[in-house]
Amino acid sequence: MARGIRRGQGQRVRHAWGVGFAQYGLVGWTVALPMIIGAVLGYWIDSTVGPGGFYWTVLLMLVGLAVGIAATWLWMRREIRHDRSLS
């Protein structure tokens, strides 16, 4: 990712540090946002259905975590393949 792009005769152009920093932020939001959405949706279901033996908030937050990790893994795999194709 931060290796840069080949230009001309084997020269590489390095990305600015801000590009790498932004990618880390994007990864964080890719994991955090589905978790937050799952927690809010679970809380809404728990408050609508009422108290029971099953906590939707925890379950949907964990589902959101799994979705975020899967999305991050797919995105990183695509980026690595793209970087290798540039080499």
Image (cartoon, rainbow, N blue to C red):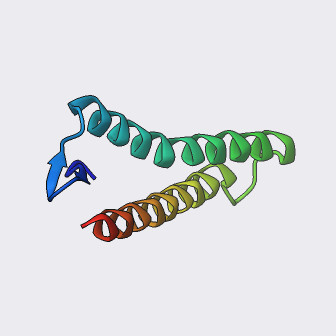
**Quarter of the C terminus within the rendering:** bottom left
Taking depth in this image into account, of 82 and 22 the one nearest to the observer is: 82
Which residue is located at x 62 percent, y 44 percent?
A: 39
Taking depth in this image into account, of 64 and 39 the one nearest to the observer is: 64
Taking depth in this image into account, of 58 and 69 the one nearest to the observer is: 69
Q: Position of residue 69 (x, y in %)?
A: 46, 60
- The outermost residue toward the right is 48
Q: Is residue 57 left or right of residue 73?
A: right
Which residue is located at x 27 percent, y 39 percent?
A: 20
Q: Is residue 54 above or below residue 37?
A: below
Q: Position of residue 16 (x, y in %)?
A: 23, 32
Taking depth in this image into account, of 11 and 86 the one nearest to the observer is: 11
Q: Is residue 3 above or below residue 71?
A: above
Q: Quadrant of residue 37?
A: top right
Q: Position of residue 42 (x, y in %)?
A: 70, 47
- The outermost residue toward the front is 9
